[in-house]
Image: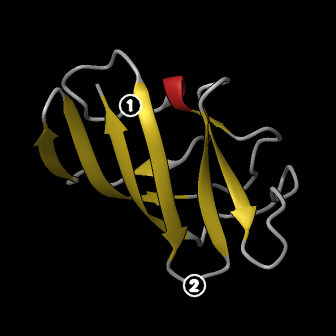
Amino acid sequence: MPLTIDPNPTKLDVADREELALDLTGDASYPTGGYDLSALDLPLRCKVRVDSVEGRDTTGAYYLVHDEANDKVLVHQVSDGAEVAGTTDLSAIVFKARILGR
């Protein structure tokens, strides 16, 4: 199951790009290698590409990393900077995220 997307994000137009400020909720089994961005139904008008993803969870234990080469969102641990292990339960984790796309 992918990340759950906040149905009411804040949208801003930034020149030729669109910025979303939204909550993303993890799932019960983090996929090894991250969440596939193309599988997410991001509410961007123009879905040519996602330029950046950033954010931290509300507990301060995790942060998001955009793997641009593979078009994925990775979850890393603040404590050691490592990606969380596959199958980690993140279903209670809410990320305050910012996504910039064009």
- Name the spot of residue 71 as percent of width and height, x first: 59, 26
Q: Quadrant of residue 27?
A: bottom right
Residue, disc 1: 41
Badge 2 amino acid: Thr
Residue, disc 2: 59
Marked residue nearer the N-terminal end (2 or 1): 1
Of all residues, the one furthest to the top in this rendering is 48
Q: Identify which residue is drawn at 53% across, 69% down.
A: 56
Is there a contact, CB below 8 Å, between mark 2 and mark 1? no
Label 2 Cα crowd, 10 Å radius (few <14 / some 14-19 / many 20+)? few
Q: In which quarter of the image is residue 46?
A: top left
Badge 1 amino acid: Asp
Q: Is mark 1 on a helix, strand or loop?
A: loop
Residue 80 shown left or right of residue 16 in the figure: right
Q: Quadrant of the C terminus?
A: top left
The correct choice, above or below, for 69 with respect to 75 in the image is: above
- Name the spot of residue 21 as percent of width and height, x first: 28, 56
- Name the spot of residue 74 as percent of width and height, x first: 67, 47
